[in-house]
Amino acid sequence: MRLHITLGEELVEELDRRAGKRRRSAYITALIRRGLDDERRWDEIEAALGTIDATGHPWDEDPAAWVREQRSADPARTG
């Protein structure tokens, strides 16, 4: 789909330096895709806020010990 957008001269100059005049569309597409992915992830983070209780977790008494235990229980981890 074609889309008409207006960009300032300085922005286009930087775009050309980074992507080249022949790769503008692909570069802009990649940036928009990355930006939308970031926005989607942020939406998911905000939706999850407050969904975990403040207490009653196995890590409450000693978080560092709990993390060490989790790491040592994973055979795929080294160190």
Image (spheres, grey):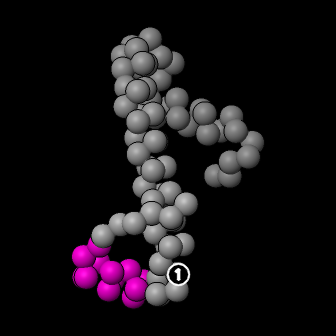
Disc 1 residue type (three-letter): Arg
Between residues 54 and 13, which one lies in front from this camera angle? 13
The magenta region covers 7-18
Q: Is residue 38 magenta?
A: no
Q: Position of residue 70 (x, y in %)?
A: 60, 33
* Secondary structure mostly taken by the magenta-highlighted segment of the chain: helix
Within 10 Å of disc 1 (Cα), the crowding (few <14, some 14-19, many 20+) is: few
Residue at point 46%, 42% (across, down) = 41
Q: Position of residue 19 (x, y in %)?
A: 47, 82
Residue at point 47%, 87% (across, down) = 20
Q: Position of residue 25 (x, y in %)?
A: 50, 73
Q: Is residue 42 visible?
A: yes
Between residues 63 and 53, which one lies in front from this camera angle? 53
> Which residue sits furthest top?
56
Quick check: 14 left or right of 37?
left
Residue at point 37%, 31% (across, down) = 46
| Element assignment for label 1 | helix
Image vertical order of residue 4 relative to residue 18, above or below:
above
Between residues 31 and 55, which one lies in front from this camera angle? 31
Q: Is residue 11 magenta?
A: yes
Residue at point 50%, 31% (across, down) = 65
Q: Position of residue 72 (x, y in %)?
A: 65, 38
Task: State the residue position of label 1.
Answer: 23
Quick check: 9 left or right of 21?
left
Image vertical order of residue 8 relative to residue 4, above or below:
below
Image vertical order of residue 73 relative to residue 54, above or below:
below
